[in-house]
Image (cartoon, rainbow, N blue to C red):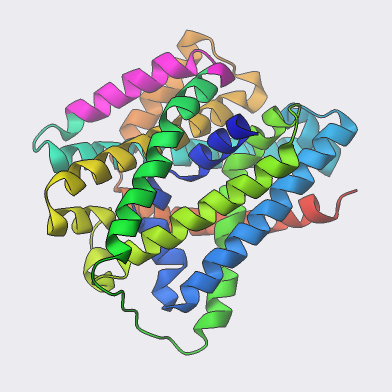
Amino acid sequence: MLQYMLIIVGTVIGGGFASGREIGTYFMSFGKDGYIGIFIFAVLFFILCSKISFTCRKRNLYTAEEYFEFLYGKKAGQAVMAFTAIFSFAVFCSMISASSWIGGFVFKGYENIIRVIMVMFYFYMLSGGFGGVKDVNLVLSPILIIGICAVGIYALLGEESSYSVEENSAIKSFFSSAVYTCYNMITVVPAVIHLSKGKNTFLGNILSSAVLFLCAVLIAVILGINFNDKMLYSVPVMKYAVEEGGILTYLIFIVLFFSMVTTGIGAGCWALEYKNIGVKKKRVFLVCLVAFFISFTDFSVFVDNMYFVFGIAAMFQMIFVLFRI
């Protein structure tokens, strides 16, 4: 159950989540109603993950290709598999972009060197297939969860959060939560399928959803202190790090960097699963090389624009997940 939770949480808490970019864009931009949105996200996430893991165990479907073909039929299943691979690749690129931005923010002038190092690291870990995903998440996920909780509680004890209130923001927040949940599910579905053979997946989904809810709320608290100023940053939480200074800056840097690695490794693995591209080093190298060049696109472009488009498309996919018996 603990391994299940760490891999699922590590897959979701990527650069967009931990940086505050996603929490600010999809929840707290609607004021305090964003907290309701975070709760809706946690509930929807639990329901969808539980339905997927239950279906996989009941039907003995333990690869993404088998699951998608069962859910949609052969041709449509292949199309959804391609959609998942494309989105996963976009997430992979965005994690490289975000980690290089963070690295360059802390170590001035070394952004592109860090970008190269991260691509080399991903190449090495992705060559190990899903085993590499497990290894990375089991080591790094506990650190990033503890780090988010520590920084969030520190912020909670400090200056009070303040948000502007939009008209009909509760309705907008509900829709935004659904979109956010759906595009995160694209990334996490392959992980849930892989892990469904294990025991206590139901409890694992409860624990995963609870941890994600807690972490999202604490990041929202951090963002609430001068929210508008922070959202001007590509990585908003770094604004808080700069304002507070000291050891908190380095703690936030570690959390952000590790969160990008955990999500990046998962997304890269799912992209390689398409058409059984597999883990042959030449193919892994090609995927990493293309991702390297695309990662020069600013991180906020991925989160604020591309992720939303994929989220809308994924809503139709999640309807099938909920109602397919």
Residue 322 x, y percent position in the rendering: 79, 55
In this view of the protein, which residue sits in the foreground, 21 or 142?
Answer: 142
In the picture, measured across the screen, residue 57 lies left or right of residue 132, that is: right
Residue 235 x, y percent position in the rendering: 28, 53
Total numbered circles: 0
Q: Quadrant of the N terminus?
A: top right
Q: Residue furthest bottom?
A: 167
Q: Residue furthest front?
A: 157
In the picture, measured across the screen, residue 244 lies left or right of residue 214, that is: left
Residue 79 x, y percent position in the rendering: 71, 40
Residue in the picture at 30% in, 52% down: 151
In this view of the protein, which residue sits in the foreground, 191 or 93?
Answer: 191
Q: Can the viewer see residue 312 in this picture? A: no
Q: Can the viewer see residue 141 in this picture? A: yes
Q: Is residue 129 magenta?
A: yes
Residue 181 vs 61, above or below: the answer is below
Quarter residue 289 falls in: top left
Residue 119 vs 155, above or below: the answer is above
Residue in the picture at 55% in, 14% down: 279
In this view of the protein, which residue sits in the foreground, 210 or 317?
Answer: 210
In this view of the protein, which residue sits in the foreground, 214 or 89?
Answer: 214
In the picture, measured across the screen, residue 157 lies left or right of residue 314, that is: left
Q: Residue furthest top?
A: 281
Q: Main secondary structure of the magenta part?
A: helix
Q: Is residue 150 magenta?
A: no
Residue 204 x, y percent position in the rendering: 66, 40
- Residue numbers of the magenta segment: 113-131
Residue in the picture at 49% in, 35% down: 89
Quarter residue 318 falls in: bottom right
